[in-house]
Amino acid sequence: MLILRIILSFMKIGALAFGGAYAAIPLVEKEIVEVRRWMTYDEFADLLALDELTPGPILINSATFVGMKAAGPAGAAAATIGCILPSCLISFVLIIIYRKYKNISFMKNFLTAFKCMAAALIFSTFLRIISRLFNPEDIKHDLIGCLLIFISFWFLRKYKVNPLYIMLGCGLIYTLCGVII
């Protein structure tokens, strides 16, 4: 029964994951953390960090990790298939529609609205993750974390550095600061 719940949950996420993987993160968070309670908020934040370290699509990686945690290898396969199936079918239909109607102003306006929605979802997730980083009892590490966020953002925007190097560097710096401070 758990496998069926996993596949159906990720089919729902896959069917509603408009705007790309980052825009779908709030959907995954709500279903996995709030509704199903297969993970805590802290585990979900850790999951997002692991997703960034692994190659491949973030949404599919998330599904695989959550499925594995909830029900082992069978859960990982169910979550992955559930996540992929709706988006493949929807993408196929949308490609046909887009090819036929891409130059119509209604289609252009519709796509612009989706871009705005995606930006809002990404920003919303960013704010939730940032709010969980701060611990009033450990202001030194909070300041280091904030500094790493801004430096990482600056390096990514200014120098187009591979995000893997930024993540590894931040992990090393934060770990060293934890040992020193």
Image: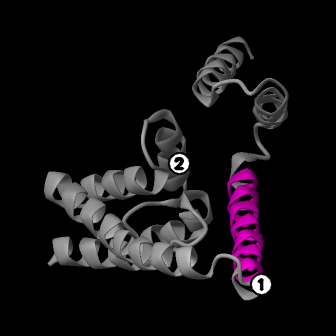
- Residue 115, given in percent of the width and then of the height, sits at 73, 69
The amino acid type of the residue labelled 2 equals Leu
Q: Residues within 10 Å of mark 1 (few under 14, many from 20)?
A: few
- Pick the front one: 104 or 80: 104
Counting every numbered tag in the picture gives 2
- The answer to which image quadrant residue 179 occupies is top right
- Residue 53, given in percent of the width and then of the height, sits at 49, 34
Q: Quadrant of the C terminus?
A: top right
Q: Quadrant of the N terminus?
A: bottom left
- The answer to which image quadrant residue 84 occupies is bottom left
- Pick the front one: 71 or 14: 14
Q: Is residue 28 above or below residue 171?
A: below
- Residue 131, given in percent of the width and then of the height, sits at 75, 56
Q: CA distance from mark 2 to mark 1?
A: 36 Å
Q: Is residue 80 magenta?
A: no
- Residue 67, given in percent of the width and then of the height, sits at 28, 59
- Pick the front one: 66 or 107: 107
Q: Secondary structure at mark 1?
A: helix
* In-image side of 29 versus 148 (left or right): left
Q: Which colour scheme appears in the figure? A: one colour
Q: Which residues are magenta?
A: 108-131
- The answer to which image quadrant residue 142 occupies is top right
The amino acid type of the residue labelled 1 equals Ser
Q: Is residue 29 above or below residue 101?
A: above
Q: Which residue is mark 2?
A: 48
* In-image side of 80 versus 106 (left or right): left
Q: Which residue is mark 1?
A: 105
